[in-house]
Image: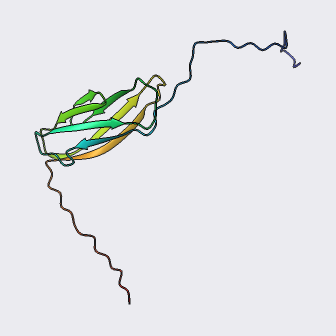
Amino acid sequence: MREGITVASEEVKNIDIGLEPCTTIKGLDFVHSPDYPDIDQPVNFTATISSGESPITFTWDFGDENSSTGQVITHTYTTAQVFWVNLEANNRCQISEHETKPIFVGVDLCFLPLISNNSEE
């Protein structure tokens, strides 16, 4: 016995405080189609996770001052530029996951060949 602490009995009791374990969200990702949309072309966004307890809320920020919720969303951009799309997923665990990716809308992309300077002599 420590000073100031009194143990009334050896019996240990479990107290139910109404909390259940929660599986946090892991592996948040998303894809969009088409890969390089034109201006005013609808873009389909689909969110995926590798694990997490349902129900899960998916909140999208499309980078153009528009947002939406849902696992599968369609959005249309009205200007040409690179937008950063942010996806947030939440469930009752209250620990959110985030994923951010660029989308190139109406932007002409130039792909250059990779040139290697490896020469076998």
**Left or right for 44, reference 21:** left
Q: Residue at x 49, y 30 (%)?
A: 24
Q: Residue at x 46, y 31 (%)?
A: 52
> In the image, residue 30 lies at what x, y percent?
32, 40
Question: How does the figure colour the protein chain or chains?
Answer: rainbow
Tell me if residue 63 can be seen: no
How many circles with numbers are drawn on the protein? 0
Task: Please identify the residue farthest to the bottom as the structure is shown.
Answer: 121
Q: Residue at x 45, y 33 (%)?
A: 25
Q: Residue at x 16, y 45 (%)?
A: 37
> In the image, residue 120 lies at what x, y percent?
38, 86
**Left or right for 116, reference 4:** left
Q: Quadrant of residue 64?
A: top left
Tell me if residue 90 can be seen: yes
| Quarter the N terminus occupies | top right
Of residues 82 and 38, the one drawn nearer to the viewer in this rendering: 38
Of residues 63 and 117, the one drawn nearer to the viewer in this rendering: 117
Q: Quadrant of residue 43?
A: top left
**Left or right for 56, reference 114:** right
| Quarter the C terminus occupies | bottom left
> In the image, residue 85 lies at what x, y percent?
28, 40
Instruction: Give the vertical position of 119 relative to 70 (above or below).
Output: below
Q: Quadrant of residue 27?
A: top left
